[in-house]
Image (cartoon, helix red, strand yellow):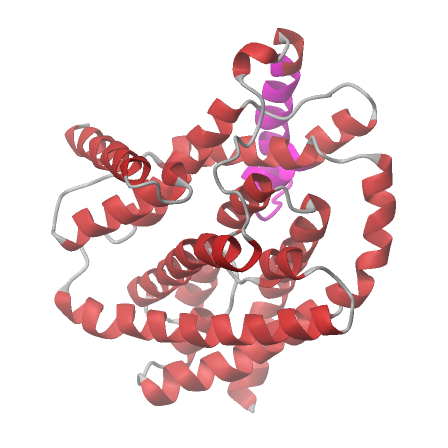
Amino acid sequence: MIRVAITFAIALGGVGAFRLVDLPLPWLLGPVVACLIAALLGVPMRGIKKLNETMRTILGVAVGATFTSALLISMAGMWPTLLLIPLMTLCIGLLGVPYFQRVWGYDFPTSYYAAMPGGLQDMIVFGQEAGANVRTLSLIHVTRVLVIVIALPFLLHWIWDADLSTPPGAPAADIPIREMLVMVVCAIGGWQIAKRLGMFGASILGPLILAAIAALTGVLHYRPPAEAIWAAQFFIGMGVGVQYVGITMEEIRRDLVAGAGFCGILIVLTLIFVEGIYVAGLAPQMETLLAFAPGGQAELTVLALVVGADMAFVIAHHVLRIFLVILGAPIFARLFRQG
């Protein structure tokens, strides 16, 4: 409990520091940066995994509550860009696997599962079964999420002048109690149902689906309050930063640098796809960047909510990417090895 208390204090200090110097997304980026620095300095920290997962359900409800009949109909027109997700995932694998193998000397299982832009837990499970270095996988994927989460807000602000200070929802005092209770049922019920069904990303997708049904049937009319979404940002940011606890100088010199280099490849590849899609007139640039950036689903959901992006467009592309990676990872790993 002492380590948890220290972690909370450090994360809150990060929020305060970001607010003091007026940096974007203080509730998300403040805990990320503060916990990262503390971890690199050897400060003992610990998060609460169950609480972190619970906070993700808030994001699921927030996205699901935005669904309308018109929004669902609009999703049918997304197929041109959705078809590009498998192509981008293939390009990531073709660039990433040789990068980790030839430049950094990792074995094939570690290289393959480090390159795949899926969920951290899923890639670690698959990688462990394939004989990969689990610690290396963890550090590389956390670095991928960290770099993209820090870089995107600044890109959104500088290029599109996106307002990242807008409250992500109405104050809790303005939302009826009945609506709050519906949100709680959607959050906890959706999460547990999805978990029992073995759904990937259960803590986000389960509440998302249940909240979307509630919104489409007229049962739910509000998104979660701003305070709840800020709390979700706080715990997600803290969870990313805490992943670096116990890191050694050797891991910094190798795994962290390797992960950062791979992030450079991912950012360039993402910008190529974003520009191509925009030039072809298939989708707006900002939504495309949020949809194609290979970061964490929860973190990019936060960004999309804050800037008021088309949530259906962003979420549909991320769900497809994660779905492809999770289902295809074991199959393509064998094909890569044979090739």
81 left or right of 18 in image: right
Residue 301 drawn at (x, y percent): 56, 45
230 left or right of 64 in image: left
Q: Is residue 263 within the magenta segment?
A: no
Residue 310 drawn at (x, y percent): 70, 46
Res 18 quadrant in image: top left
In this rendering, is residue 321 above or below 115? Answer: above
Magenta stretch bounds:
180-208
Residue 211 drawn at (x, y percent): 69, 29
* Residue at 81 percent of width and 62 percent of height: 79
* Residue at 54 percent of width and 18 percent of height: 171
Q: Residue at the top extreme?
A: 177
User: Main structural element of the magenta stretch: helix, strand or loop?
Assistant: helix
Q: Nearer the viewer, residue 18 or 327?
A: 18
Residue 326 drawn at (x, y percent): 58, 61
Q: Is residue 193 within the magenta segment?
A: yes
318 left or right of 11 in image: right
In this rendering, is residue 29 above or below 89? Answer: above
- Whether residue 210 is visible: no
Q: Nearer the viewer, residue 292 or 306?
A: 306
